[in-house]
Image: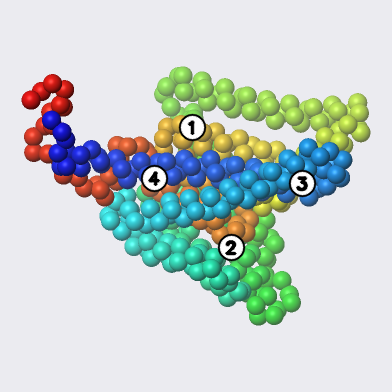
Amino acid sequence: MPESPMARKGRVGPETGSLLLEYVLKALLVAGLCELVLYRLISRLGMHLSKVAQEYVAVEYFLRGASAIGFALMNFSAILVFLVLFTFLFYKVNGLLARPWDHAVVALGSLLLALTVVFLLFPPGMPGSIAYNVLTLALVWTLVIQYCRGNPAATARALALCYGAGVSSWLYYQISTTTYGWLGVASSPPLVHEISRLGEALMVVATALVFAVYSGFTVRSKNRQQRRRTGQFVATWAALFIGLLVMDGVIEIFDPATAQYVRQASQGIGWIFQMGMGYTFYLPFALYMAGLLFWSYAVIKQVSMGRRAGYGLALMFIAGYALQLSHLTLFVVVGLLLIVNDGRIDARESVGRLFPVELPDRPMVEASGVS
């Protein structure tokens, strides 16, 4: 017999809302990562490969194509991060994923979304930029406090505080320099460069804390296999970095010219990441590489487990340190929201309660020869 309208309505199921968030987050992660590589890294590398591009047409076409695709992905990821933030605020308003201080998060997040839309339509002046950064600073620390309240572990709180202080250092740089420029003050704000460098160092420290909190490796575990895996991981990367240092010294002894070439290549890699992610690389290059490896492992592990924290950590890394674009600021906010409201993003989440369904009073019988 044909399905009744009530039965068809029951097929919507409670997983509708969670499926929307799951697919949007996956699309945002892929789009944001591709935008980072194609637009902020490769396309900007083309500014220093102009001679090579003139000599080889294929290189020129590759750089042009990467820049065009990356720019389109930047707009696409901006739309997706806007949608994710709106979805989270919608959940909070309806009492789902409830945490302390949610009223402040909803108020500040809604105002940030509204300002973002207004500034996209009407580019802001210096006062508007100052207000936007101050609002971002308030929202970031509200989320940091939420995370600390919900995670009593010392390493987890240290992670949130280090990352919040790192982002705040960049926001202080932006707010102070913009304010001085608006007021017409020619001198530099107090300790602006020192605080900016301190913030960059704190971001690097945060990558190690991410590994400590989210990697699953621990030496305190009673599980022998887990302790053995932790020891193998530490030994492998320690041997790798010691090997790199030894290799640099050996090359310096036998061929100083080659050693200088290798160091220049590493500086070039640092320049690419500086342009794309805002790191100045005043710290030893090995620390940045270690942070990248720690962060990447934690992200891959959490994403493979289907945890929101994995997507949040990925977005926080993709945003980088210098938040010069509005969608990068939203990446940071959404990333913090995801780690604060950690959990599995699958079709079995309770967020489907936003979409109530009416199930039939009696089981539906399929029409396969039954009258």
Q: Residues within 10 Å of mark 3 (few under 14, many from 20)?
A: some
Taking the spot 63% from the left edge, 47% from the top edge, the residue there is 70
Q: Amino acid at mark 2?
A: Leu
* Count of numbered circles on the image: 4
Res. 206 in view: no
Residue topped by disc 2: 171
Against 214, is 184 above or below? below
**Which badge, 3 or 4, is on the more N-terminal residue?**
4
Q: Which x, y percent locates residue 358?
A: 16, 44
Q: Amino acid at mark 1?
A: Lys
Residue 21 numbered mark, or none: 4
Give me the C-alpha separation between circle 1 and circle 4: 20 Å
**Which badge, 2 or 1, is on the more N-terminal residue?**
2
Q: Secondary structure at mark 1?
A: helix
- Asked if the residues shown at circle 2 and circle 4 are in contact, with their CB atoms under 8 angstroms apart, the answer is no
Residue topped by disc 3: 46
Q: Which x, y percent locates residue 300?
A: 51, 33
Residue topped by disc 1: 301
* Residue 60 appears left or right of 299: right
Q: Secondary structure at mark 4?
A: helix
